[in-house]
Structure formats: C-alpha cells, structure tokens
Amino acid sequence: MTNKELAEKIDITEANLSILCSGKAKAVRFSTLEKICEVLECDVGDILKYVDENGEEKNL
C-alpha cells in the first residue's frame, strides 16, 4: 500500500502521514492511531517504538 492510499483510508493528508512516518510528529491522535492499525491490521506496538533522550530504542 502506498502512503497516498493509506492517507486516504485513514483520512489525513499525505504531508501529515509523512510527518508521522518520519518520527517528527510531536503527537498523534488516538483516533488516527486506531485507524492506522485497523487499515494495516496490526497492533500499536507493531508501529510504535520508544526512543530515549540518547536516541536508544527501548522495549516497552
């Protein structure tokens, strides 16, 4: 699925999806996160990761 198709299915702009995908988003609405998981048939943990202030990934 392309970013354009995903953006259309979750009803956000391609620009906003790009911000989410790049990790530069300051926040994400739960409703948007829910739509992404629904469309991609995944769990939140499959698409989010925690990175500490040192840039190290941490398991949640």
Image (cartoon, grey):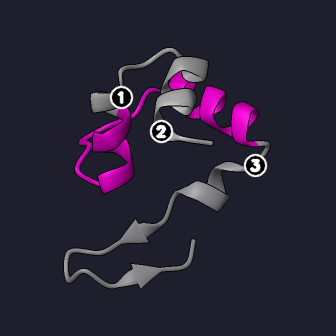
Q: Residue furthest right?
A: 41
Please report the residue visible at 61 percent of the width from the left and 20 percent of the height from the top.
9
Judge whether 47 appears above or below 33 on screen.
below
Image-based side of 41 in relation to 44, left or right: right
Residue identified by numbered label 3 = 42
Residue 42 part of the magenta segment: no
Pick the residue in front: 5 or 36.
Answer: 5
Please report the residue visible at 30 percent of the width from the left and 75 percent of the height from the top.
52
* Amino acid marked by disc 3: Cys
Q: Earlier in the sequence, mark 3 or mark 2?
A: 2
x then y, percent, for residue 50: 43, 67
* Amino acid marked by disc 2: Asn
Image-based side of 53 in relation to 18, left or right: left
Q: Which mark is residue 3?
A: 2
* Amino acid marked by disc 1: Glu
Which stretch appears magenta? 17-40
Please report the residue visible at 56 percent of the width from the left and 29 percent of the height from the top.
5
Residue identified by numbered label 1 = 14
Q: Secondary structure at mark 2?
A: helix
Q: Compute the Cα span from label 1 to label 3.
A: 20 Å
Q: Are marks 2 and 1 in contact (CB under 8 Å)?
A: yes
Q: Earlier in the sequence, mark 1 or mark 3?
A: 1
Please report the residue visible at 28 percent of the width from the left and 42 percent of the height from the top.
19
Q: Are marks 1 and 3 in contact (CB under 8 Å)?
A: no
x then y, percent, for residue 1: 63, 42
Q: Secondary structure at mark 3?
A: loop
Pick the residue in front: 60 or 29.
Answer: 29
Which is closer to the viewer, label 3 or label 2?
Answer: 2
Judge whether 11 appears above or below 39 on screen.
above
Specify few, some or many for label 3: CA neighbours under 10 Å numbering under 14, 14-19, or 20 or more: few
Residue 28 part of the magenta segment: yes
x then y, percent, for residue 38: 74, 32
